Amino acid sequence: MCSGTAAVRPIQGARCLLATALSVLVLSACGTTISSAPASGSPAESQGSISGQVMRGPGPDPRSGGAGDLVPVPGDPVTAQNAEGVIVANAVSSRDGSFAMDVAPGVYTITESICAVKAHVEVRSLATTPVKLTIPNSC
């Protein structure tokens, strides 16, 4: 149980922090979305979602697609940054390169964090916004 203050119980506080960080890493590795709470005064029902895929184009890199095909990129971190520049949701691409994030309606910059590929999207209430992030061969 994570209770008390870190000053009173430094070992317990460190264990709680480690357990929380480990939980976030495990969920992220499974392609699970980690989102912030809905904006104040905004019920969860009015949230929207972002559904995307991280892909790599054809090229000489062995991880690239061949003959003009795109291939999925698993395990890449993806973030959603709001108009104020705050990261409000994180995800990790799954085996098929897909990821999903639940966010409040608004304008977001979606970023694949390894190669810094970005896309700008507008999310509407109760709607799913698609996005495809294509990584260049040079990355």
Image (cartoon, grey):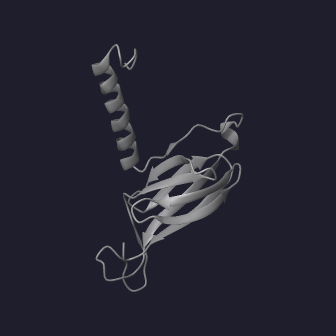
Task: Find the residue positioned furthest to the bottom.
Answer: 67
Which residue sits at x=70%, y=53%?
124
Q: Is residue 104 above or below residue 15?
A: below
Q: In the picture provided, is 116 more to the left or to the right than 19?
A: right
User: Residue 51 versus residue 2: which sits nearer the camera?
Assistant: 2
Which residue sits at x=39%, y=16%?
5
Q: Position of residue 39 (x, y in %)?
A: 65, 38
Which residue sits at x=35%, y=76%?
64
Quadrant of image for the N terminus? top left
Q: Is residue 38 above or below residue 71?
A: above
Q: Is residue 55 above or below residue 44?
A: below
Q: Position of residue 75 (x, y in %)?
A: 36, 57
Marks counted in the figure total 0
User: Residue 136 versus residue 98: which sits nearer the camera?
Assistant: 136
Quadrant of image for the C terminus? bottom left
Q: Quadrant of residue 59?
A: bottom left
Q: Position of residue 92 (x, y in %)?
A: 42, 53
Which residue sits at x=32%, y=15%?
9
